[in-house]
Amino acid sequence: MNRGAPDGAKRILVTNDDGIDAPGIAALCAVLSRLGDVTVAAPDREHSGASHALTFRRPLRVRKHSERRYAIDGTPTDCVHLAVFQLVAGGPPDLVVSGINRGYNLGDDVTYSGTVAGALEGTLLRVPSLAISAGFDAGEPDYDVAARVAAGLCTEVLRRGLAPGTFLNVNVPPGRPCGIRVTRQGSRTYRAAVVERTDPKGEPYYWIAAADAVPADEADGDHVAVRDRYVSVTPLHADLTHVPSLAALSSWNLEIVP
């Protein structure tokens, strides 16, 4: 784990994909400020669905809102990358926390999530990281409950660390959670999620709409945990290699076709 700040306080970097003015990030910073020195580096606007995109084709602009609070015209991955190397005072952070996202990031959705990508980027930069999301039935999620869940987990991560290459994906159900479950990444069966419409000139255009999906009924999956009103804590790994397939592929007749 990274060394502490010169005065002994831990350096905590916070980002999100809902934008720097989102209520979830404000609730998160309020509780994490009790654990250490918080630096916020977040997109200047919403970047939901940005996944792990990194900006290469244009410069990034940083606007300082206040002490240790920066808005960046880029993705969550940009924000973490830039903050780790340039914005966090005193050296690399001891912890990266991404969220609190408005809505779940469960199962296959982690591959699209900018929130999860923020934690993944921290992990790739060798900083212990976690992503936290809050579900809701109507209106806004209860960010206070999710923030308190985050504070407890962050305390444990700062104390114990995480295995190399791993980070935590946390999802908090609405209402009062029944408890916390350690889960695996679940899966869902997706149906068509593209809506075709016609503009005033008669030309077709398309919206990628919310997917109609049926979660698999996996007893240890993240979908089942939040359905049962438990907080889901899933350890994810940056190494996407499917180890069991290595031996199978080695037995193939692999050759370069002339």
Image (cartoon, rainbow, N blue to C red):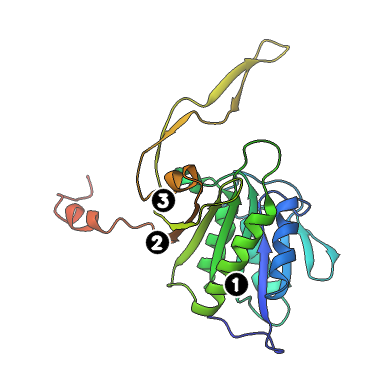
Quarter of the image with the C terminus is top left
Left-right relation of 109 to 58: left
Q: Mark 1 near mark 2, Cβ–Cβ under 8 Å?
A: no
SS class of the residue under badge 3? loop
Marker disc for residue 239: 2
Q: Which residue is mark 1?
A: 95
Instruction: Kindly tell me whether residue 80 is visible in this rendering.
Output: yes
- Residue toward you, 97 or 238: 97
Q: Residues within 10 Å of mark 2 (few under 14, many from 20)?
A: few
Up/down of 139 relative to 127, above or below: above
Going by the numbered disc 3, the residue's amino acid type is Gln
- On residue 185, the disc is 3
Question: Quadrant location of residue 246?
Answer: bottom left
Task: Name the quadrant containing residue 94.
Answer: bottom right
> Mark 1, residues whose alpha carbon is within 10 Å: few (<14), some, or many (≥20)?
many
Image mark count: 3
On the image, the x and y values in percent for residue 171 come to 54, 52
State which tag comes first along the sequence, 3 or 2.
3
Identity of the amino acid at label 1? Answer: Leu
Question: Going by the image, does 189 lie left or right of 251?
Answer: right
Earlier along the polypeptide chain: callout 1 or callout 2?
Answer: 1
The answer to whether the residues at label 3 and label 1 have Cβ atoms under 8 Å apart is: no
Q: Which residue occupies 58% across, 56% down?
A: 132
Asked whether residue 59 is in view, the answer is: no
